[in-house]
Amino acid sequence: MSFITVQGHRIEYVRLPSAHPRQGYPSIVFLHEGLGSVAMWRDFPQVVADATGCEAVVYSRYGYGKSDPITRPHDVDFMHNEGLNALPELLHKLSLQKPILLGHSDGASIALICAGGTKVPLTGVIVMAPHVLVEDVCIRSILAAKAIYDDPETHLRERLAKFHAHVDSAFRGWNDVWLHPQFPLWNIEEYLPTISCPILAIQGEDDEYGTMDQLDRIARQAKDVQLLKLADCRHSPHKDQPEAVIEEVGAFVQRLMAT
């Protein structure tokens, strides 16, 4: 585990070499979900690295994992700031040339914002359960998560504390901003038409945080989109259908390198 300063905050990250490195292949940068961190990815980044021949670069955003805790509530545009400012700074400081971004949930939205809203050169973007707009089903699930977290008998706080050094900061930072009265207006569709690199978009048919309208909007508005819609899969495709995800990610990386 290493640390780097991004936008004045101490950020944890790790670089995982592939067991089968391919010369000239780009790094894959993993962007975690709203309650994720380096540790919460578990072995998925290493499995992807070994399957693709790419180095995996994994980091915890400001407020998560072992990174600095937030000192004030997130603004409604916090994902915009991450995608337009913090992520490009991180990529520059780590000297990552034309990486592939792989994001889950909030991390997927951040990847799309970076791809469509900056001049950072990217080889491709992989998004799992992305948000491009706010749906009622998402707000209902986030309200339910708040109730579970606030109930000590569920032990959710204790479970999350294994992955976050500042667990209340991490949970409240995510939960509070999604429940902000202005957040239903949040939308990143403006960035989709300007994404020039290929996109692989993955979502479970049983996703409790979003409908397939999210993927369909990406497919309609971005230039080069490949979709994977998975049955018997909720909000975390890499946990519910890992074999299908690894196979599709591997094929997508091969396609990118062939072209």
Image (cartoon, rainbow, N blue to C red):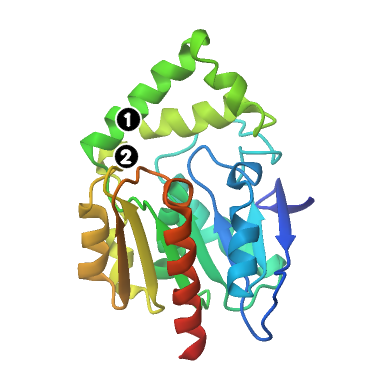
Amino acid type, label 2 = Tyr
Pinpoint residue 203: horizontal percent, then vertical percent.
33, 54
Amino acid type, label 1 = Ser
Pinpoint residue 36: horizontal percent, then vertical percent.
55, 41
How dense is the environment of label 1, judged by Cα within 10 Å: few (below 14), some, or many (20 and up)?
Answer: some
Pinpoint residue 155: horizontal percent, then vertical percent.
55, 16
Dot 1 lies on which element?
Answer: helix
Q: 31 above or below 20? A: above
How dense is the environment of label 2, judged by Cα within 10 Å: few (below 14), some, or many (20 and up)?
Answer: many
Residue at the spot 32% in from the left edge and 63% down from the top edge: 228
Q: What residue did someone put label 2 on?
A: 209
Task: Tell me if I can see residue 145 in this picture.
Answer: yes
In contact (CB < 8 Å): disc 1 and disc 2: yes
- Comparing 211 with 22, the one in front is 22
Residue at the spot 34% in from the left edge and 46% down from the top edge: 233
- Comparing 138 with 187, the one in front is 138
Quarter containing the C terminus:
bottom left
Residue at the spot 62% in from the left edge and 31% down from the top edge: 71
Q: What residue did someone put label 1 on?
A: 141
1 or 2: tag closer to the N-terminus: 1
Residue at the spot 73% in from the left edge and 61% down from the top edge: 15
Q: 259 above or below 157? A: below
- Comparing 5 with 105, the one in front is 105
